[in-house]
Structure formats: C-alpha cells, structure tokens
Image (cartoon, rainbow, N blue to C red):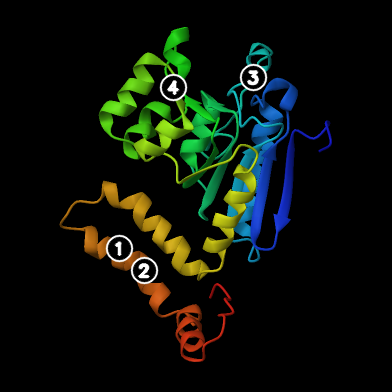
Amino acid sequence: MPDDQPVIVERRAAVQIITINRPRARNALDAAVAEQVAAAVDELDASDDLRVGVLTGAGGFFSAGMDLKAFLRGETPAIEGRGLCGITVTPPRKPTVAAVEGGALAGGFELVLACDLVVAGRSARFGVPEVKRGLVAAGGGALLLGSRVPRALALEMLLTGDPVSAERADAMGLVNRVVDDGAALEAAVELATAIAANGPLAVAATKRVVQQAPAWSPAESWARQDEIVAPVFTSADAREGAAAFAERRAPVWKAR
C-alpha cells in the first residue's frame, strides 16, 4: 500500500474496505486518519452500491490508539459530535466488521467496539490500558464494553488495563470468528459479503432495532420496533424477496 496515504479505501463488490495505513506508527490515530475514516464511512452510508464496511489496519496491526505525538502537536483523532474517527458516537447506519490482526488497543479497541462484528487473527490482542496511564477509556471503552461482554469481564479489562487474547475475547463473546494470523481481512470480507447479499433495508432496520432496543421500556418496545420495521414490510425489496424465493432465483435488491 502507498506509504503517503493514511487511509486506503477499496471496494469489493458491495463491501467497502477501510484500511488505516500507518504501519510504522502501529496505525496510531491522528487528525488525518480520523477525517479520512469519517469520510469513508459517510460514503458507505450514502452509497446505494455499498452495503457493508470492513475496518482494518495495515502491516499486521489494527491500531494502537491515539497518536500521542500528534496529540502533543494539538491534533485530535475525534470528529466533533461524532467521536473517534467519526464512528464511536455516531456509528455507521450500515453494518461494519472489524478485521483485527496484532493489537487493537486503547482508541484502536474503541474503534473495534464501534463496529458491529469482529474477526480476529489468533495472535490478536484487545485492550484498554488507559488506567495504567492515569486516564479513562472515554472514547467508548468505558461506555460500550459492558454492553458487549459480561459486566465483570468488562470491569476486569477496564480496571486492570491488561489486554486479552483473541481466544479469550472469543470466549467472552466479543469476537465473532477467530482465524489464522493473516486471514482476518479475508474472513471479514467473507462475513461482510454474506450480509451484503441480504435485503439492504431489512439489514439496516435490523441493526437499528438491536442498537436502540436497550433504551426502550418494555411498554414501548414493540411499538418502537414497528416504527422502524413497518416500512421494510411494505417496500419493493420485500416484494422482490418473496418473488425471488418463489421463482427460485437470487433477489435483485433496489434498497426501495
């Protein structure tokens, strides 16, 4: 990959691949990375052709988090109102898969938490070491980790600052698939491709329900779900899905 581009964006059919490309700095996050990741995610959500995003790092390492040298120069990898790289506070509307090799640490781990699914190489490590430096994982780690793994395990990671292996992350339910080292990206693209084959309106609505349901009271949950999914059932894609099934052919989605 070109050394002078901090983020590389590629397309594979309906899958967008976003690669943080600062391997000499362990893909540390600076303002340029943040702006380009945010722009790529905006393209993902705006495009009718792109259905799923994959976020990864170059050189066998996901990301070591915020670039401290850039921070001392006054830079931040946060986008105002949107969080780290534009995705931790306002995640993409479309599904995203993190493909993790090496380490996903501090802000790098918080980017993983902003993704919906995670594929990891066997040697990958996940950690929030902020407390070891007298800091708090305020980019999403402290807020979001407890919703992804049991509370006691989230607190262990957050309060000790010690990283966990891909194997343990898998046992905790944080990782969807553990693959051989070097194979995380291809496995993530395979998973993303399987998602992209489904109805785009249905996929987006399903993600919204899963994201928002924890904030709903039991009394309102069914009504709130119906608000989101009702347009899907009356869409052209719903009719196309039924017709394709009856005619034993692959559906042609229009996202309408």
Q: Position of residue 120 (x, y in %)?
A: 53, 39
Examine the rendered structure and indicate whether residue 208 appears above or below residue 181: below
Q: Secondary structure at mark 3?
A: loop
Look at mark 3 in the image and give the residue it sits on.
67
- Report if the CB atoms under discs 1 and 2 are less than 8 Å apart: yes
Numbered tag placed on residue 225 in the rendering: 1
Q: Residue furthest bottom?
A: 247
Which of the two discs, 1 and 4, labels the residue nearer the N terminus?
4
Q: Nearer the viewer, residue 203 or 244?
A: 244
Q: Residue at x 70, y 21 (%)?
A: 25
Q: Given the image, on which type of amino acid does mark 2 rest?
A: Val
Q: Report how far apart the C-alphas of labels 2 and 3 lie in the structure.
A: 41 Å
Look at mark 2 in the image and give the residue it sits on.
229
Q: Quadrant of the N terminus?
A: top right
Look at mark 4 in the image and give the residue it sits on.
137
Residue 89 visible from this viewpoint: no
Which of the two discs, 4 and 2, labels the residue nearer the N terminus?
4
Which of the two discs, 3 and 4, labels the residue nearer the N terminus?
3
